[in-house]
Amino acid sequence: QVQLKESGPGLVQPSQTLSLTCTVSGFSLTSYSVHWVRQHSGKSLEWMGRMWSDGDTSYNSAFTSRLSISRDTSKSQVFLKMNSLQTEDTGTYYCARLTTPFDYWGQGVMVTVSS
Amino acid sequence: DIQMTQSPSSMSASLGDRVTITCRASQDIGNYLSWFQQKPGKSPRRMIYGATNLAAGVPSRFSGSRSGSDYSLTISSLESEDMAIYYCLQSIQYPYTFGAGTKLELK
């Protein structure tokens, strides 16, 4: 069945780089897009970007040039890298396949930015 | 960016009540509107896509509608398992943007 699972460090120091991995199973990254969505604690959801099935990417301009999404199709993994982290980047990060009529989400990974 | 203004921010209702949540888009988004449900400690789950289409496995008491730039999610007869936070999402233009959420509680 379709599954997505995020992994990465739970704690990142301010000004450092966040690296997250979304490992998918049950489908091919060359057939479906994967999105990254984050949620500040107790707050709404924020769309960050998308890895298209053809390898192209789309980003939320709010993250300007500090966000990068890439993939390794042989490992069925999508990567998120975001630099210059600040405390405001603390939250839960999700990867998701937002297809219709089924959508699939990972369980999320909690990231705290703190020294 | 397209702003999605969601109302109310919270509401309490009784079991069996009819409940409606609304999102207003700042620009034309056609029918590129989804509704998501999120329960505490869980990932979001899409309930409605294309403004009016029920997502797979979603109970038929949920429905979506559109009137101009106003989009609504209606639960025809509230059940205890529907207590959650609901978000709208526009997906016609990047960046995709979510509403601020509506917390639905039991009265």
Image (tube, coloured by chain):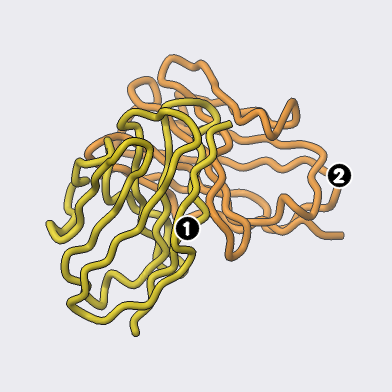
Chain colours: A orange, B yellow
- Between label 1 and label 2, give the one nearer the viewer: 1
Q: Residue at x 33, y 45 (%)?
A: B71
Q: Which of A37 and B83 is in front in this view?
A: B83
The quadrant the N terminus of chain B occupies is top right
Provide the chain ID for the residue under circle 2: A
Q: Which residue is drawn at 31% across and 50% down?
A: B72
Left or right position of A85 against A91: right
Residue B13: image location, x then y, percent:
31, 78
- The secondary structure type at the circle numbered 2 is loop
Callout 2 crowding tier (Cα within 10 Å): few <14, some 14–19, many ≥20: some
Q: Which residue is drawn at 46% across and 69% down?
A: B10
Image quarter of residue B82: bottom left
Q: How many labels does the image show?
A: 2
Residue B101 is tagged as: 1
Residue A32: image location, x then y, percent:
35, 26
- The answer to whether residue B47 is above or below residue A61 is below
- The secondary structure type at the circle numbered 1 is loop
Left or right position of A88 against B80: right
Task: Please name the residue that numbered disc 2 is placed on.
Answer: A15
Left or right position of A7 against B79: right
